[in-house]
Amino acid sequence: MSAEKTLIVIAGPTAIGKTDLAIKIAQNFGTEIISADSRQFYKEMSIGTAKPSFEELKAAKHHFINSHHITDSFTVGDFEEQALELIEGLFKKHDILVLVGGSGLFIKAITNGFDKLPKVSPSTRMELNELYTNHGIGVIQKKLQELDPVYYAEVDKSNPQRIIRALEVCLSTNLPFSSFRTGAHKNRDFNIIKVGLNCDRDKLYDRINQRVDKMLEAGLVDEVKKLLPFRSLNALNTVGYSEIFDHLDGVITLEQAAEQIKQNTRRFAKRQLTWFRKDEGFRWFLPTEYHEILKFIIAKAEL
């Protein structure tokens, strides 16, 4: 592949305006968008994932939106393999592509490469998800600490998906998850331009609160009700769904669920920013600075 091909990465915290910017950039260059949002892959999860609207999906062609069913096993490694194959094909008709999302691991898989992890059995994943659902995060945290103290020392201990993924590997291989993590950077045969979006914290938190209110008005509770039979799946152990499950169980009121979603989403946004700021390759902008972003991309891509 020609090194003149360029992948524009747009990342940042949830609710910052990544979708809007990605569409504008894609329209400007007449190209297509690859989603790197680990929850928007699933057809059954729309409202709670703030998936692009029908109009937004029409405005620019998107890939990896509604591409999988909730019951499908789809790991970061799977995404790396399938997305790179897609990118190679799309570069045959476009010189520029846009990768957008807030899932740091999925973006890193494309830009830096992801360690090849062994396949795990669906039954192991199901057992761990049920363990977490029935007994809480403390139980799986303790299990990971016992099986892989090295990874336990560095993992985000408030993220059940990361903990469960590591435990899957530990239990399936009888080896610590950390032993499979080489961290080796894989060089890509295309240019990568990284754009990060951020804004004043109070403004971001206000955007998050407004988004949650809109989700509830749009029917989030009904969406979650339909997913009750699948609640043990890893994809649903996430902000916006876990809290509504608690409400449907009678543990908390809808008002309490709404406040918890807002609070947990704000915490999630903070973790996203911490992740992306570790990557010095990002150039940061306000979401309103479209023209400055466009100038930056043009200069970096030498267009």
Image: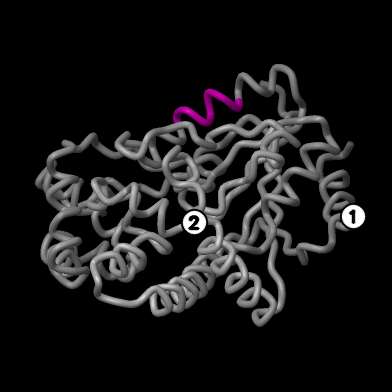
What residue is drawn where x is 46% and y is 78%? 259
Answer few, some or many: residues within 10 Å of disc 2's Cα (few below 14, many 20 plus, some between 14 and 19). Answer: few
Across and down, in percent, residue 277 comes to 59, 66
Q: Main secondary structure of the magenta part?
A: helix
Q: Is residue 14 above or below residue 250?
A: above
Residue shown at the point (75%, 51%) measured from the top left: 21
Is 86 magenta? The answer is yes
Q: Which residue does the numbered mark 2 point to in the structure image? A: 219
The amino acid beneath tag 1 is His
The tag earlier along the polypeptide, 1 or 2, is: 2
The residue at which mark 1 appears reads as 291
Dot 2 falls on a residue whose secondary structure is: loop
Is 288 left or right of 66, judged from the image as shown?
Answer: right
Q: Which residues are magenta?
A: 81-87
Q: Nearer the viewer, residue 229 or 115?
A: 229
Q: Position of residue 179 (x, y in %)?
A: 24, 50
Which circle, 1 or 2, is nearer the viewer? 2
